[in-house]
Amino acid sequence: MRIAIAPFFLQSLRSDARSGKTYLVRAVMAAFLLLMLVSVHERWQYVAAPGLDLFSSIVWTTAFITCLAGPFYFASVITEEKENKTIGLLKMTALRPAWILMGKSTSQMIAAGMLLLTQVPLVLLSVTLGGVSLRQIAAAYCALAAHLVLVANLGMLFSTLGRTLKRAVTGTSVCLLGFFLLVPLGQHMLGNLVGRGSLSASGLVYRTLEPLLRWANDSSVFTRGREVLSTGFSGSPIGFQVLTNLGAGGVFFLLAWAVFDRCTRDHQAGTPGRGLLFMRTSRLRGFGAGRAWRSALVWKDYHFLVGGKGFALVKFLLLGALLGGIYLLQRLSGYPPNAEEFGDMTLGIMIAIIALQLVAFHERILGSERRWHTLPNLLMLPCSAWGLVWRKLLGCLLGLLPDLLWFGFGARLHFDGLVDLLEEVLSEPGAWYALGAYAVLLQLALYLPLRVRRGALLLAFVLWIAGLHAGAAIVMSLTGGYGSEDTFLGLLAALVFALAVFLHWRTMRRLVRQGGAE
Amino acid sequence: MSETTPEPEAVVSVEALSHTYKRTHALAGVSFTVTQGSIHGFVGPNGAGKTTTLSILATLLRPQTGTVRVFGHRLPRDYKAVRRRIGFMPDHLGLYAQMTVFECLDFFAAAYGMKARRRESVIDDVLTLTDMIRHKDSLVKSLSRGMSQRVSLARALVHDPDLLLLDEPASGLDPRARVELLEVLRELSRMGKTIFISSHILGELGDLCDHVTIIDRGRPRYSGTMRGLLARRGDVAAYVLTLEDAVPGLAERLAGQEGIAGIEQSDGEAAYKLSFDTGLTSANAVLRAAMDAGARVVSFREDLRQLTDVFMELTEPGVP
């Protein structure tokens, strides 16, 4: 075992020590903790237990970051080897599959654990600040460590199963999202059904589902966090959540081990798939890519980046099922929405989904070409870098047609709601600021794949959030807190729009030079 | 009135080209000219600056110092005009793995503004030329390395470029695939294309190229005709004569010819390695003498091992 883990661990240590990113991430973490400390200091007089306040902020943020960044970080364990075509070489060594899995995941878990350790000195300050005990700190870090093990092993399972990093990240994220959202929702629904008498509390369904959902809910780091961070916590540092998370981590590891050989045999693993695009020799060639359009880049990205007609149909049906499901849940809860309410809700959901997809599309426009090593051939086409990006974006926007249909459905149900929303956007400086900030996020998602090969989307979100906070602080310090809120937001809006334009210009400049660097 | 042969037009003209990556000098004062219709080899050891030069010619990198003209257009200023007339095959191929061969070529042809009806016939033509027509509907990711190289070449040809820039097109190919690829390139040359091909093996290009530029550690070592390169070996030429059957006494008879410096017969084989003084005799005269002696000649070609010797002389040992 020692022999198995050593090469991976030493390699990971070496590459971490050499990489500037490692120090940057730790510096960002330290800066983030200091920011929290400053924030607590500002609110010193209004908070009863500043130590607990600081500690809670750190614990919740760490738990959220683990959920958000974990899939990107841990799901690359095996897919990275698949995409680099080195998995076969790894299997040819004397290392057994279990050793490979353990060696790769342990080194990543230790690297992630180091980030938790960097928090400890500052976290101990919260004891001095008051309101938190050492027992709470120990319990919280046990919970976070167990949660880390769970996410790492889940990521490793999907990394083994998935052919590409994208699939592995999606699988891990969907599982985590399902666990943290569906379990509380299920409990809520079950309680409502029993409360309304639709379901008997002594019936088999309730008696089966209730303990299962309670057990799942108690296994959540967020449930455990609430328990640990409550005033007067005196429980054991090793709670039920710690045991179940470690157990589940072990099960995921065993599953990854069981499927490792089968899932790493395919020599085409790591190459992008066609999704729902049928070949022109297939009977369902109507759902294929067909002939290239006159605007070839639009055709390519519509079909090979966002899935084409087949995926559009599936997405349309899935979105319909989601909206229908929400309507049904609300009816079951005893509060059926009227047409206007449902229209507003549909508009809100679709705006959120479209906004998220646009960010993902921006990342993939150039990121996918870099990952597939096709950027030089694309840059050789007789069009400018600007034209290239916009044509590709147009192809991706065609993939939003199903979303826009449902958006139109929401607008049809409550047209006034849409008009109100537009009026608000046009008249409120805050809305302009939000739009500008979103434009910055889009440009970051477009630009960063040209600088980093992996994790560009996550980095974009992190930089965006950090940048927004820093920008607001700078503008506030420059204006000295004088002037109205509208002036402040107007200044911020101008700043973020200027930043978005600058980032777009940087992307175009970088893109022109990237072809020769590939 | 005397007729003069017009000078072939310079398709590529590079003068004093230099390029630096941070502190590494990739190119330092490289100059060469590629004439129309030629097959120009661009040879150098690994890290010599071949890919950097090709990237600049392909308009993917901006030249830092020096002048680069392609079809008379100065780079990077007139890059759009150049892109339409060149086909670039990078060393990592750059094909869309999830597309079929047809979809991939159809996409690139459409991106170059070709009409749908014409695209179909052009794709068939380039796939026939590269012998990949049977794999038209295969997924790119299902192809072998050799097949992918052919598809990549077809992609570079799909918009009918006048100049082909090929970055180590034969690397990673088995001997048969290599020979077949070089045959395709000869065919393209016969069709009037100018070919600029890079390789780190001079011998590989000896049979194919009429011009060659040798580069090492970013510095040019030789640029000119292949024959001129061989002439650097002095007045002694080396040839390999292969016969259908060994002819008894042939070696002795040829050795008696004027100008023959050495002759060596492979044990039990009908192949002779000859070296002769080009000031006293010629390849034609040697071949005539062999045929007069009753030899049935299969091939009579320059010994490419000599090119390897030249390459070793021109380049420095060790890793740059």
Image: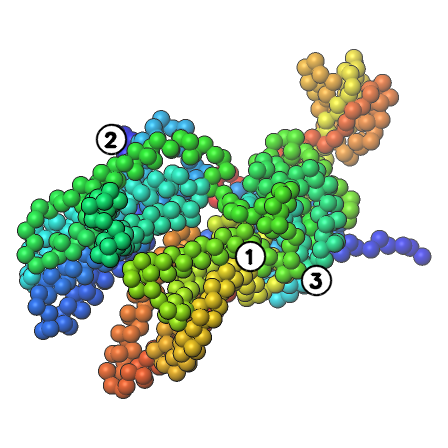
Percent across and percent down for residue A516 are 53, 55
The residue pinned by badge 1 equals A302
- Toward the viewer: A286 or A431? A286
Q: Residue at x 32, y 52 (%)?
A: A177
Q: Is residue B173 left or right of residue A434?
A: right
Instruction: Answer whether residue A500 is visible to the viewer in this image.
Output: no
Q: Classify mark 2: residues with Cα within 10 Å, few (<14), some (14-19) or many (20+).
A: few
What amino acid type is highlighted by mark number 3?
A: Gly
Q: Secondary structure at mark 1?
A: helix
Q: Residue at x 23, y 49 (%)?
A: A200
Q: Residue at x 84, y 23 (%)?
A: B291
Q: Is residue B16 left or right of residue A311?
A: right
Pair 2/3: label in front: 2
What amino acid type is highlighted by mark number 2?
A: Arg
Residue A426 in the image: above or below residue B22: below
Percent across and percent down for residue A46 are 11, 73
Q: Secondary structure at mark 3?
A: loop
The quadrant holding residue A482 is: bottom left
Q: Gap in Å between the C-alphas at discs 3 and 1?
A: 38 Å
Q: Gap in Å between the C-alphas at discs 2 and 3?
A: 64 Å
Q: Residue at x 18, y 41 (%)?
A: A243
Percent across and percent down for residue B150 are 65, 41
Chain letter for mark 1, please: A
The residue pinned by badge 2 equals A2
Residue A432 in the image: above or below residue B5: below
The residue pinned by badge 3 equals B72
What amino acid type is highlighted by mark number 1?
A: Tyr
Q: Classify mark 1: residues with Cα within 10 Å, few (<14), some (14-19) or many (20+).
A: many
- Toward the viewer: A114 or B164? A114
